[in-house]
Image (cartoon, rainbow, N blue to C red):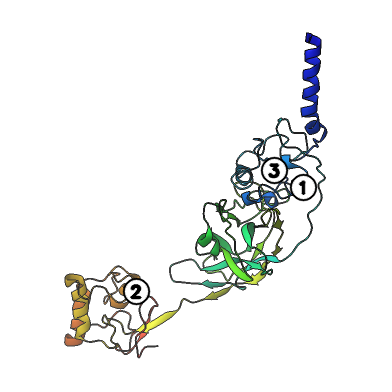
Amino acid sequence: MDAFGFHRGVALVTALVVSPVALAQSDFRRGDTNTDGVVDARDVFLPNFFPFDVPPPCRDAFDVNDDGQENITDPVYLLGYLFLGQPEPPPPGPHTPGPDPTEDSLDCVSYDPKPPPARGGFRFDLDVCPIEIVDAPDTPPQGEVAITLAIDEPSHPGAQGWALGVSVGGQLDLLDATIDGTAGKDLLSAGFEKTELIDPSIDGGGAPQGPGAVSTVVLSFTQPVTLRGEGEVAILRLRVGAPPGIFPAGSVAIVDGLRGSGQPVTNTVFLGLAGEPDSRRPELGGCDEVALIIVDPPFDTHIPGDCNQDGRLDISDAICVLGVLFLGVPERLPCGDGTAADSGNIELLDWHGDGRVDITDPIGTLRFLTLAGPAHHRVPPGANPFECVPIENACPRVEGCF
């Protein structure tokens, strides 16, 4: 065969191999796996969805890191871009459709963005409304509220993850956000979690977003871990507060578009349906313009100086304090953590009001009982020094005191 014939044969073979991919290549947004025209949380399809029962029409969109493969690294890359501020997916990128500049075995037969179908069955909401704020001494008024995921489809395999944004408004301060103490924390295993308070000064195009938090959880990349069953489960806990001396009115709402370290968050539930990638846009709840309830911290009442908590004040109480301070018997004082530094023990046993429990306090008790010395400093003038007064609720309730 002459040189011309050889090169013509190579060209023919090359055309047969390459042309099917080339002819089937449509412009696309990398990462837009649900083909709705936007790369956001609803595009995070988890690795148990690969390989597909039926290949999607634009497999290139699933190749988020452009390595020519569909595997666990793709949703991990997309999560990093969306929620951790990491680089956006390679060209053509997540914003403007374009061709794939990399030759690989994946194709994009068609890319025709359409809004996803409206599908319910899930709701983000608050566990309580209104919120109780405890106005405790020497601390700013604070309270706690949980964000819940309500599942109305008991036969559904369940939520494998979620992304949510919570906005706090009015005179209410958002002090902390965490998944500790929630079902998500209990089930998290080899997955992904990012929860953070947002920068309230970030302007998303209309105005500063204000205080709030964003949280994204994928329970596992390696196991079929899901929230199952009908009902509500807590997935995020918020600690809220109010300025001292202000009767607050505020709001807590679950909203789209809040931005933490990464891109604006779209409220989403990721679902574990093997072979059928799916995510849902849940209904969004909250407490709008709710007047928060300020409540006093609960107190029990005790006889000042009653160290052994037997409901009366006598010489045994002085012996109790001396024993704890110098003999280690009993092993602990009655309130809080059992130490002389605990605020409840100071309030109960600090006879002179000097802010500590020491040897002067049992001496004060003995002087009062035997030498007509001064009563405990917590006893109001003219009151009976053997009657109960309010003490921090870290002390156990004493029979006869209410």
Q: What's the mark number on residue 35?
A: 1
Which label sits on residue 344?
2
Q: Decide if residue 153 is in sight here.
A: yes
List the residue tagged with mark 3: 62
At label 3, the amino acid type is Phe
Residue at the spot x=80%, y=32% of the render? Answer: 20
Mark 2: give few (<14), some (14-19) or many (20+) Cα within 10 Å.
many
> What is the distance, in whole Å, between disc 3 and disc 1 at their CAs?
10 Å
Q: Secondary structure at mark 1?
A: loop
At horizontal 59% and vertical 61% (from top left) the residue drawn is 226
Secondary structure at badge 2 equals helix
Q: Position of residue 243 (x, y in %)?
A: 54, 65
At 77% from the left and 19% from the top, the residue drawn is 10
Left or right position of 189 against 281:
left
Q: Amino acid at mark 1?
A: Thr
Mark 2 or mark 3, whichever is nearer to me: 3
Can the viewer see residue 238 in this picture? Answer: no
Where does the C terminus fall, quadrant-wise? bottom left
